[in-house]
Amino acid sequence: MEQRAFQDYYPDDVSHCYGCGRLNEQGIQLKSYWDKEETVATVTPRPYHTAIPGYVYGGFLASIIDCHGTGSAAAAAYKAEGRRMDSGPPLRFVTASLRVDYLKPTPMGVPLELRGTIKEVSRKKVTTAITVTAAGKVCARGEVVAVLMPEHMIPSSG
Amino acid sequence: MEQRAFQDYYPDDVSHCYGCGRLNEQGIQLKSYWDKEETVATVTPRPYHTAIPGYVYGGFLASIIDCHGTGSAAAAAYKAEGRRMDSGPPLRFVTASLRVDYLKPTPMGVPLELRGTIKEVSRKKVTTAITVTAAGKVCARGEVVAVLMPEHMIPSSG
């Protein structure tokens, strides 16, 4: 796996996301990487990211699926263009739709592994299927449809 | 509207959820109420619940839709049984699946209003359609399928 995460290539002015912004001190700071054809991220929820005691909050799982999906989308779009993530212009994706199926309760206190499979990729839209595994069991499945961020939303373009 | 929120009726041992647990000090503490046939909640994201600067994080929207959905499910299930939320046995729902469509960027700095419509209700499963409105515009639509919490997940039953 590469040492630098997808999110480490995001320009500073779009790196404040609660889920994956490296500049959000209170945030989750998710980091996603390629692992062959799949994308992977590992994260351990904080104690307060709980649902009922002992289990991970479903909104936390939706959040990490969301950010792993937009990160995977950016990486896949660069790859489709045959260029590196540090080349310009930057590609940053936002979520158009998110679906999560909670298959079984997700235990607290263990690292969660997210694995993404790119289902469809075009210049402006990428769909990623994602599993969340805890202690060897797939606890949730998600799908993220991500679209290229409209230019007017990028702070530095304003 | 009633003064007491759906979540205020949850037993203490299932009131630690990051999204809606009144006992989770770091959490969002969402409060949902009936408004005639709809369910309603209002919440203002904290500054760090951002996506890119100026806009609300999609994972935060998924989280509040999730908790408004499980809260609405509990309220609808009590109503279907013709009993008050402070009567036993307690009904507490968890999310089986969640879908969110992000229609437009959701601005930070204003209260978000969630409105739920109960689509289907049975003793063990409730489906709720939810809109999130900011500054008069519907920014996201969600659907939550919630199921009655399995007894083995309730701490006091262990």
Image: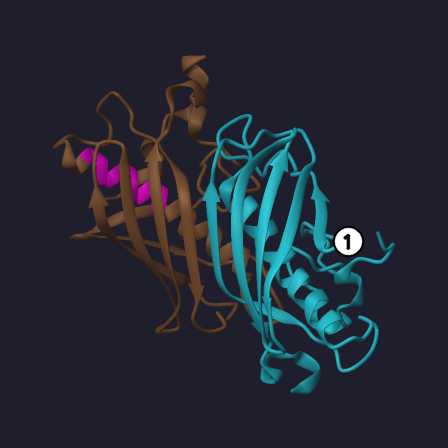
Chain colours: A brown, B cyan
Q: Chain of mark 1?
A: B
Residue found at x 60% / y 42%: B132
Q: Residue at x 52, y 55 (%)?
A: B143
Q: Is residue B54 above or below residue A64?
A: above
Magenta highlight range: A69-78
Residue A50 position within the rendered picture, expressed as x and y whole percent measured from the top left: 59, 62
Q: Where, by quadrant of the figure, is residue B7 drawn? A: bottom right
Determine whether, in the image, residue B75 is placed left or right of residue A37: right
Is residue A72 found inside the magenta-colored segment of the image? Answer: yes
Question: Which of the 4 image quadrants contains residue A52?
Answer: bottom right
| Disc 1 target residue | B36
Q: Residue at x 35, y 74 (%)?
A: A136
| Residue nearest the viewer, comparing A26 with B8 | B8
Residue B103 visible, this orientation: yes
Query: Where, quadrant-wise, is the C terminus of chain A in this rendering?
Result: top left
**In the displayed structure, does residue B70 sit left or right of residue A107?**
right
| Identity of the residue drawn at 34% across and 40% down | A146
Q: How many numbered tags mark residues here?
A: 1
Q: Position of residue A148 (x, y in %)?
A: 32, 31
Amino acid type, label 1: Lys
Query: How many other residues sit within 10 Å of disc 1, few (<14), some (14-19) or many (≥20)?
Result: few
Extreme residue in the top direction = A158
Image check: A5 left or right of B81?
left
- Where is residue A108? Give x, y as percent: 52, 68
Up-down relation of residue B53 to residue B32 (above or below): above
Magenta region includes residue A7: no
Residue toward you, A48 or B113: B113
